[in-house]
Amino acid sequence: MNIIRLRKWAFLVSGLLVLASIVTLAIPPALRPGIDFSGGAAFTLSFAEPVQPTDVEATLIGVGHPEAIVQPSIEEDGTFGRTYFIRVGELEPTIRDSEGNIVTPGGREKIEEALEALDTRPAPEPGAEQPDFVDVQGFDTVSGVVAGENVRNAIIAVIVASIAILLYVTWAFRKVPSPFRYGTAAVVALLHDVIIVLGLFSLLGKVADVEINAMFITGILTLIGYSVNDTIIVFDRLRENVLKFPALDIGEIVNLSVRETLGRSLNTSLTLLLVVGALLLFAATSIQPLLFVLGAGVIVGTYSSIFIASLLLVAWEQGDFGRIPIIGRRRRTA
């Protein structure tokens, strides 16, 4: 299998995917932020009796939250309608007096009171006590200021990770010719992976209302680690073969190294995809963004480690980029 002959096609496919991702990200909103990045509140609550999701949504619209996201949980018997995860925008604060009594109900109290009105149970007998219809099991809120800090910290984390990877790979491959090219190729491959995954989530946010949250950032950082790990597996074998076969052309060495590591890379990726698929079936919805990023990242990262990082070294060494024609450039005449 002569992989280096496919480098122009691989670069073309990757270029189109990256371009499509950038265009998608350029269309607002670039990504649909969740509570961690936009600010807002999230409820986890349980009703005493099953309630239809449409009734919950209508109730939230009635109290001024048309943007609310309502997610019912499936019970053990396969039905839904008792436990809900609800996400809304920022809520009005509750005003209390010096003794802690509520003077002016806030957004949380208004929502809970409106949901209590969905109670259709018969009135209890005189003297009998009836439990509350709504049981709030969890409540989280994030202010807009904290959300902005989360965005800034996420960007800084990605930049710092990229610089650290560039320096480390350059140092680790210092015994081979042009070690800086190895570090640059690894960073280009991980940026390629991150941009494509961001573009995918941007598209999903526009067509399927998929939001990003803190778990998404965890997934992106995990993707960076996986992408670099997969690339270094190929590069490490490439380093061994460069020292072992100094007379061979870089293209032949890359071909040999990729063939020797292809099975390991594919088996590792397939195993991880099976685990991600199993978690998507049985794990809680709160970690689904992480799992989606991992699934997409494994596929894109495996592709980039074989067809981008390694072939970029060949293209750089053989001067392919210097032969790219420049539109409008005139050929010199003697």
Image (cartoon, rainbow, N blue to C red):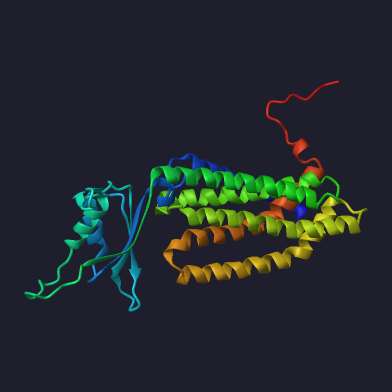
Q: Residue furthest front?
A: 99
Where in the figure is residue 88, as x and y percent of width and height?
32, 52
Instruction: Residue lying at the far top in this picture: please name it.
Output: 334
Between 16 and 313, the one lying in front of the other is 313
The N terminus lies in which quarter of the figure?
A: bottom right
Question: Which residue shows up at 11% across the image and 76% down it?
Answer: 128
Give the tally of numbered discs: 0
Q: Nearer the viewer, residue 7 or 111?
A: 111
Image point 52% across, 48% down: which residue? 199
Q: Nearer the viewer, residue 264 or 88?
A: 88
Position of residue 134 in the picture relative to residue 278 (left or right): left
Which quarter shows the C terminus? top right
* Any part of residue 26 in sight: yes
Can residue 311 be seen here? Answer: no
Q: Position of residue 55 (x, y in %)?
A: 22, 61
Q: Position of residue 22 (x, y in %)?
A: 54, 42
Measuring from the top left, give residue 214's x and y in whole percent: 48, 54
Q: Quadrant of residue 44?
A: bottom left
Q: Residue at horizontal 60%, vertical 67%?
A: 272
Say left or right for 295 vs 188: left
- Report which quarter residue 284 is drawn in: bottom left
Query: Residue at 84% across / 51% down in the picture?
Result: 250
Q: Compared with residue 15, is residue 138 higher up or lower down, i.e. above or below?
A: below
Q: Farthest residue toward the right?
A: 247
Q: Residue furthest left?
A: 126
